[in-house]
Amino acid sequence: MTYCKSSYLYYDSFAVPLRFEQGSLKMDEQEQHSSPSSRRRFLKQSVACSTALLATGMALPRLAQSAEPLSRRYPDPSLEVLDESFLQLRLFNASVEKIADGLRWAEGPVWVGDGRYLLLSDIPNNRIMRWDEISQSLGVFREQANFSNGLTRDREGRLVVCEGSTTHELGRRVTRTEHNGAITVLADNYQGKRFNSPNDVVVKRDGSIWFSDPPFQAGNYYEGHKIQTELPDAVYRIDGSTLEVTRVIEGIAGPNGLCFSPDESTLYVVEGRAKPNRLVWAYAVNGDGTLGERSQHIEATGHGALDGIKCDEAGNLWCGWGSSGSPEANPEGLDGVRVFNPQGEAIGHIHLPERCANLCFGGVQGNRLFMASSHAVYALYVNARGATFT
């Protein structure tokens, strides 16, 4: 029900403030009980009010559209079973759903359970977006986000951001958003040299922050600015107490997505520019915050390309997947999410109509997979929860 009262337009439980010329939509008690011409005049003014709203583009609040399933068939044909063990992770009657659209390059999603919303980066548009689970709506969380990329939360629930480039000289750093909204710079250089373009980030249970620093956003004006990089490709660790920065991995070409195993004894890191195929390395994590020996965990054969990765509670690795860009590649068959068991064997593939750059687990039970995929965000309920759900 919609009606006008004083300086507000009421629509069910919503109130939208309006501004009118004095007396343009006012009918006092005496007029309400006066002649029919007065009442007709008020009705005409009410119609004029509605017309003015439409003319100025002031839309009434409306319910957001529900999630759009890619297929109405169960089980969802988008889920390809590469090994029978994947059937334990697939829910028979759950569909891949498109929940948001209109992005240029969606990246770095993180679930905010206490607010029931998802944050993600829209890098070319230089902003962080917010998708609300209750209203099913997408809006801007932060403009001028320094071309943010990977997002995560620390042990106190504060947002940690990889700022991949600069806006007015600020950026190419890792920041933390405090509970009052203030932004704290955790690190912006290593031994006096500026980072290349911080890409992905994860927080360990001891509070330390680990992030990759490739040159991906340093070579164009689409996802940042062209710059002359000062540091080699590397992965860094920020001490959670002292904020001391140490380089934990070097000699790696284009480090990208990273995550810990459920017990945090292993750090998985994507080598995004490995030749001839992209790789995931498994590094042993030492108790003093250093890394031990590494072993090859996954190789993206068949012209596949890895990006962001996340571990579930059982140690399976869920990987953003797409084409390497090779002329021989078949993007339609590659785009989506590929799932590997703890031994590094592919067991399933979630096919999407767009390349998936990054993903995260979320939802009330931690069993909803959110996939940031080029122009859109997709979601799927699975029989698994993220390793960091607790």
Image (spheres, grey):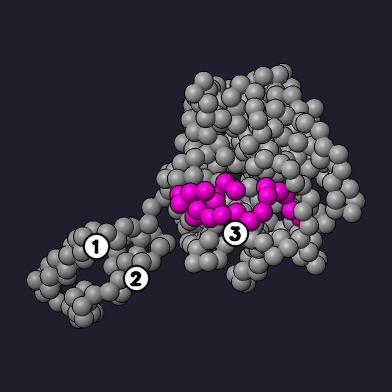
Relative side of 28 to 72, left or right = left
Provide residue 37's location: percent of width, then percent of height: 9, 71
Provide residue 234's location: percent of width, then percent of height: 71, 48
Q: Is residue 298 visible from the viewing direction of this image? A: yes
Q: Is residue 236 above or below residue 187?
A: above
The residue shown at (64%, 27%) is 276
Q: Is residue 229 magenta?
A: yes
Provide residue 94's location: percent of width, then percent of height: 59, 30
Provide residue 62's location: percent of width, then percent of height: 38, 52
Would you call the spot at circle 2 few (<14 residues within 10 Å), some (14-19), or many (20 or more)? Answer: few
Name the N-terminal-most of marks 2 and 3. Answer: 2
Please tell me whether mark 1 or mark 2 is closer to you in this view: 1
User: What span is colored magenta in the figure?
Assistant: 215-237
Q: Secondary structure at mark 2?
A: strand
From mark 3 to mark 1, how far is it between C-alphas? 41 Å
Tag 2 residue: 17
Name the N-terminal-most of marks 1 and 2. Answer: 2
**Circles 1 and 2 in contact, beta carbons < 8 Å:** no
Name the N-terminal-most of marks 3 and 1. Answer: 1
The one nearer the camera, 350 or 12, is: 350
Relative side of 14 to 18, left or right = right
Q: Is residue 51 above or below residue 342?
A: below
| Image disc number at residue 172 | 3
Q: Is residue 193 above or below residue 360?
A: below
The residue shown at (75%, 40%) is 268
Q: Secondary structure at mark 1?
A: loop
Tag 1 residue: 56
